[in-house]
Image: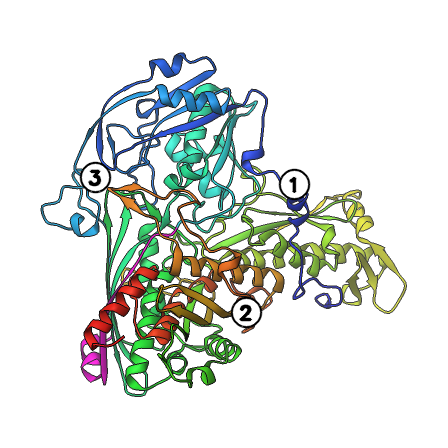
Amino acid sequence: MKTPTSIGSPLGHETVQVTARSKVLGRALYAGDLKLPGMLHAKVLRSPYPHARIVRIDTTAARALPGVRAVLTGADAPRTLWGVRHRERRILADGLVRFAGEEVAAVAASTEEIARDALDLIEIEYEELPAILSPQEALDEEAPGVHPGRSNIAHEIRFERGDPDAALASADLIHEATYTTHAQYPGYLEPMATLASIDAEGRLLVQTSTQSVFLARARLAEALELPVSSIRVVQATTGGGFGGKIVEDDNQLIAGLLALHTGRPVRLVNNRLEDFLACCSSLPERITLKLGMARDGRILAKEVRIIAECGAYAGLSAEVMHVSAMRSDNMYRLDNVRSHATLVYTHTPPHGAFRGFGGTQMLFALNSHIHTMAEQLGLDPADVHKRNAVQAGDVTVHGWKIGSAGLRECIDQATEAIDWRSKRAQPRHACGVRRRGMGMAAAMHVSGNRTMGNWDGSTVVVRIHEDGQVLVLSGECDMGQGAATMLSQIVAHELALPLSHVRVAPPDTDSVPFAIGALASRVTMAAGNAAIGAARAARDKLLALGAVLLEAHTSDLELADGQVRVRGTDRVLGMAELARQHIWRHGGEAIQVSHTWDAQTQMHDAQLHGNIAAAYSFAAQAVEVEVDTETGRIRVLDSYVADDCGKALNPMAVHGQTNGAAVQAMGWALYEQLQLEGGRLANGNFADYTMPTADAVPMLRGGFVQSNDPNGPYGAKGASETAILPGAPAIANAVYDAVGVRIQDLPITPEKILAALHARAKETGRA
């Protein structure tokens, strides 16, 4: 039996998301839409101070307010601490608050209005304490611990490969510079929301916006001190995650705690200000980078020093910093590297996972650095990237095995699309108020990541109903990136069915197989391969029964149009009939098969060496900008992102992800910045937190490099994160090309442009 032909297959074709109809008709149910009889509404009281001792809490008046069913403080919560690498956080603060916005008390009432009124009636006396608000303060030898009895260093990474000192000594050019990157809010459409209730069996049911139902369940069980089996987590329709809805938010824990105390359903929906305060933003880093380069552009050595600020709690920040410290080393044929990265606590809101997961920070520094050095050597930066780029078959300095690599092709595609060489040949830094410049950058990412534990797999169940339609069960979450569509496409292709005959069930820990969830661009790789295996196992059952009923050999059968037929004849059986016959016979059973795929990868060892992903994705971006030298305003005039996604299973979805990533990168590079004043967030709303809108971005252009990865499903790799990585450095390089000033401190604001131009004019004595 051959794999179904591509005729009628949805693979590789523009495919509308299978969730689109319910969303555009308003039928999709987000967690904030869910209602249950007797449901209570929750609100959270947050600390106004970055660091304070809770002297006294009086909830008497709040509890007495009609309609209030529960007022909880840290004294009412379990004593168990929760967290990712470090167990260090309470569901509700007890004794101390460590950042402005930390959850101190929670109310459940019959209406949101009553719950808000009850918050105003809670009396709290604080003793404000000195706050550590920067990594420099935190690392001072005399600084007290943000967590008493512990160092302010939350995590530290050191490694060395080869002989960086000897390689630097042999270099024709050495360049060292420091770059700073800032925190970015995820900016998803749907703020965090949870509906928690107690079911008829006394189990906790949590319906929530999440990227991983099983990681959410594990955290709920640990923090609430409950057995895992007593908790059921169901993913509601999720309106974006971008890393912010993995395992770092307190929303689910508070909703669950209130439901357990009241015995009633409790819905907790963040408003936008609450979400700004509660959601982990991306990790700010200060990166000092030294590169040694040969005259021909070969990178001989790389030395990195990173100071990263996790805020009051570490969350996933250690893992993010790990990526910053070492992932980009593997993008090039590089033998000599040294890295030292330090994660530091402060009394500021926590940082953590964000799309690109540490890659954005380092790639801003690295791409800016390479552009600077290429200019000093009289080389084209695009050529320098290509000269050093890894290729398929390479084993990198950290032991990563590159099965496919389209980095060089991405660079060519992006630069050619934007007319890179001819435009760069034009005079630079010409006179005039508005000046144009070109910039490019390159990037790499993973498709899966064997670092959370010694498993990076996925299990998919395929069930064929008696009417011939198919149900797919997977624990991998669709947060808008298209996971459900991808699984539907694969199963429909393998079973030669219309896409409409395949349905993917929402992740539910009671009914779907275990999965890690939507992170590390792993879903297409892991769940896609598992779906192929499950669909083929279901196909084999259909063919085996078809061979008996049609009195033919399985090799003579084929699947087409929802039927099994004897090739070259009119003898057919419909899938529905076969599904029924598979049950109604001696020893029969419904067709339900399961397949697990686990990447043949290797956890890194104590020296951080090992092949941690099944595949590695690459991207390049080229941009043209215009800089107004009188106002400092920057406009991105043109942008082209080339994405090595292995194989575009759904070009429409990949384009959508690429465009969204490109815009998020523009926001981080130019506009978005969380402003803290005395440790307090000053712009926690969309009126003051500037994000790029349609009129601020050019017509977004992009294309694919289909490198056909040997480990990917039909050659596919992850395609949702890589495209965010090159945007900021491409813009920074273009700004430099336009006006000759290098901004190394993101975001690149008009004020910084004008200050740099003024400083240059003062230094040179001319405008």
Sequence-wise first label, 2 or 1: 1
Sequence-wise first label, 3 or 1: 1
In this view of the protein, can residue 675 be seen by the observer?
yes
Quadrant the C terminus occupies? bottom left
Q: Nearer the viewer, mark 3 or mark 1?
A: 1
For the view shown, which residue lies furthest in the left direction?
Answer: 142
How many neighbours does mark 2 have within 10 angstroms: few (below 14), some (14-19), or many (20 or more)?
many
Residue type at numbered disc 2: Gly
Would you identify the image quadrant in which residue 759 lies?
A: bottom left
Q: Nearer the viewer, residue 557 or 311?
A: 311
Sequence-wise first label, 2 or 3: 3
Residue 529 vertical position relative to residue 276 in the rendered view, above or below: below
Q: Which residues are magenta?
A: 162-184
Residue type at numbered disc 1: Gly
Q: CA distance from mark 2 to mark 1?
A: 30 Å
Q: Nearer the viewer, residue 660 or 318?
A: 660
User: Badge 2 is on which residue?
Assistant: 702
Say which mark, if any, is on residue 63: none
Quadrant the N terminus occupies? bottom right
Q: CA distance from mark 2 to mark 3?
A: 46 Å
Q: Could you tell me which secondary element the residue under label 2 belongs to? A: strand
Q: Is residue 170 magenta?
A: yes
Say which mark, if any, is on residue 147: 3
User: Badge 1 is on which residue?
Assistant: 26
How many neighbours does mark 1 have within 10 angstroms: few (below 14), some (14-19), or many (20 or more)?
few
Q: Could you tell me which secondary element the residue under label 1 belongs to? A: loop
How many neighbours does mark 3 have within 10 angstroms: few (below 14), some (14-19), or many (20 or more)?
some
Would you identify the image quadrant in which residue 43 lies?
A: top left
Instruction: Provide residue 464's location: percent of width, then percent of height.
Output: 72, 48
Instruction: Provide residue 373's location: percent of width, then percent of height.
Output: 29, 79
Q: Is residue 262 magenta?
A: no
Residue type at numbered disc 3: His
